[in-house]
Image: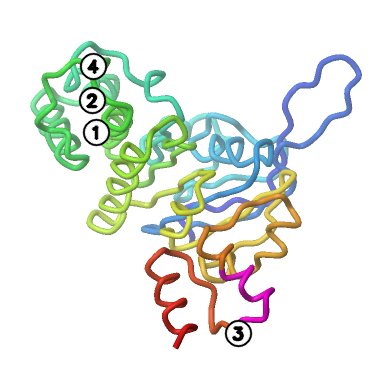
Amino acid sequence: MSFVSIRDVRFSYAQEGEQPVVNAVDGVSLDIEKGEFIAVIGHNGCGKSTLAKHLNAMLLPDSGSVVIDGDDTSVEENTYTIREKVGLVLQNPDNQLVASIVEEDVAFGPENLGVEPSEIRRRVDEALKAVDMYEYREHAPHKLSGGQKQRVAIAGILAIQPQCIVLDEPTAMLDPSGRQEVISTLLKLNREQKMTVVLITHYMDEAVLADRVVVMDSGKILIQGTPDEVFSQVELLKKHRLDVPQSAELAFRLTGCGLSLKSIPLTQADCVAMLEEAMR
């Protein structure tokens, strides 16, 4: 059985007046395996953030089911267990930082779970080391950079020891350096600790790093597959007002000019190799 099993989920937000009800998530089915790195992409309003909030029972489906490691999110008794298994990191780290000292902030989650003080100390140290923020443990969060704040927010989730971490556009408010810090942290957690990662993002260069890319449009899953499979469908993505990695965009335009290419490059290195081969 998959770690996350989503079946025909529909969800709509309350509408004002006589406006017609529109499903923010409209009949989505998706399986996520333990240890996978999934990127969910799509334009604003496509339902990706709403879907993310279903993964730790912040939202419950109007119909269909979300099952996390065998626990149905619609069963109230499962909520506590599910939120221990799935941690959610929001876009703005300032909304998740609650203490005046970094290590106290990271300790907040396990303290609320009733974890023993000695175990909290161990978890806080391990979480901060996992995101390379241990040396900042006695700093004030508000004095950190955006990327550092987001890494502290991730450490706060790690201290709860979830099996899966869901991140809703965690790099949207960061500069390129901060974005790199956060993405490097996620790759490290996924590859070294085998943590399941679900990343909601607008940045295609982040999505190409995932094991699988899920593309949403109008509350539905448009396509899904490996980054190669998804981003090779440039025309389909453009038809739905979606971006593609710059390397894929260049290859698409060159193909349109008559250049024959063996594959669509996704990274700068792949693009350079493609151009070198084409110029021979």
Tell me the residue that label 2 is attached to.
Answer: 106
Q: Are the residues at dot 1 and dot 2 in contact (C-beta closer than 8 Å)?
A: yes
Image side of residue 14 versus residue 42, left or right:
right
Image location of residue 179, percent across then percent down = 36, 40
Whichever of labels 2 and 3 marks the residue nearer the N terminus, that label is 2
Alpha-carbon distance for marks 4 and 1? Answer: 22 Å
Q: Nearer the viewer, residue 118 or 218?
A: 218
Q: CA distance from mark 4 to mark 2?
A: 16 Å
The magenta-colored residue range is: 251-260
Q: Is residue 181 above or below residue 124?
A: below
Tell me the CA gap for discs 2 and 3: 52 Å
The residue to which callout 1 is attached is: 159
Mark 2, mark 3: which one is toward the viewer? 3
Could you say which is closer to the camera, residue 62 or residue 210? Answer: 210
| Residue where numbered disc 3 is placed | 260
Closer to us: mark 3 or mark 4?
Answer: 3
**Residue 205: quarter of image:** bottom left
Q: Decide: few, some or many residues near mark 4? Use Cα within 10 Å; few <14, some 14-19, many ≥20.
A: few
Report crowding for label 3: few under 14, some 14 to 19, many 20 or more residues within 10 A (C-alpha). few
- Quick one: SS at disc 3? loop
For the C terminus, the quadrant is bottom left
